[in-house]
């Protein structure tokens, strides 16, 4: 994939993730669920690879925070989920493993890392079980949405490129 196409595709994913968080979210206890972020993570991981997916997750989290649409918890969950989704897809070449990577990366690892992160940066002292349900619900919903969209576009030109050209 050439550099211009890569940057343009990343910008489109960032726009979808940022705008989508404004329209599709729901409360999940202590946190809010933003399934569009997780859908974008899965789609970016499969189409672009792990590193672009992490960059996209970071920029979406940054924009959401700057626009007042999210919290600092957008960073640990989104970025870890994108990274794990990208590497599991790269290793297996099966889209379902990108979804599994997003769920494990965000729903479990991201939730557990959010406890000290919330304590240090947000001044909130809660246990791991406070984040797990919300992060899991959000990442499962988003992973399903992302996999459904990918299954519908799997025969498009970007999906037909060899994986080596998408990373």
Image: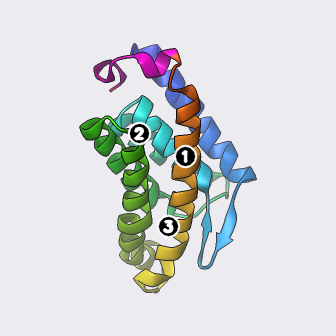
Residue 56 placement, left or right of 149: left
Pair 3/2: label in front: 2
Where disc 3 sits, the SS reads helix
144 and 130: which is toward the camera: 144
- Per the image, label 1 sits on a secondary structure element best described as helix
Of the 4 image quadrants, the one containing the C terminus is top left
Q: What percent of the width, then of the height, locates residue 100?
A: 39, 53
What residue span does the magenta drawing correspond to?
157-166
Q: How many marks?
A: 3
- Report the residue marked by disc 1: 39
What type of secondary structure mainly makes up the magenta span?
A: helix
Quadrant where the N terminus sits is top left
Label 3 to label 2: alpha-carbon separation: 19 Å
Q: Are marks 1 and 3 in contact (CB under 8 Å)?
A: no
Looking at the image, the residue that sits furthest to the left is 91
Dividing the picture into quadrants, the one containing residue 76 is bottom left
Residue at 45% x, 75% y is 118
**As drawn, 151 above or below 28:** above
Q: Nearer the viewer, mark 2 or mark 1?
A: 2
Indicate whether 136 appears above or below 51: below
Sequence-earlier tag: 1 or 3: 1
Closer to the chain start, of discs 3 and 2, is 2
Q: Which residue carries the number 3 mark?
A: 136
């Amino acid at each position: 994939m050439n550099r211009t196409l890569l940057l343009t595709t990343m910008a489109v994913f960032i726009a979808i993730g940022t705008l989508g968080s404004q329209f599709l979210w729901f409360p999940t206890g202590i946190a809010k669920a933003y399934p569009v972020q997780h859908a974008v993570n899965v789609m970016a991981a499969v189409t672009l690879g792990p590193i672009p997916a992490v960059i996209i997750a970071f920029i979406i989290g940054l924009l959401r925070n700057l626009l007042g649409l999210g919290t600092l918890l957008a960073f640990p969950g989104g970025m870890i989920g994108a990274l794990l989704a990208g590497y599991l897809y790269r290793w297996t070449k099966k889209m379902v493993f990108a979804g599994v990577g997003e769920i494990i990366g965000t729903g479990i690892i991201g939730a557990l890392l959010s406890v000290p992160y919330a304590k240090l940066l947000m001044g909130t002292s809660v246990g791991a079980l406070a984040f797990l349900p919300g992060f899991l619900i959000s990442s499962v919903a988003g992973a399903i949405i992302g996999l459904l969209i990918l299954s519908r576009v799997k025969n498009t030109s970007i999906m037909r490129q060899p994986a080596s050209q998408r990373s």
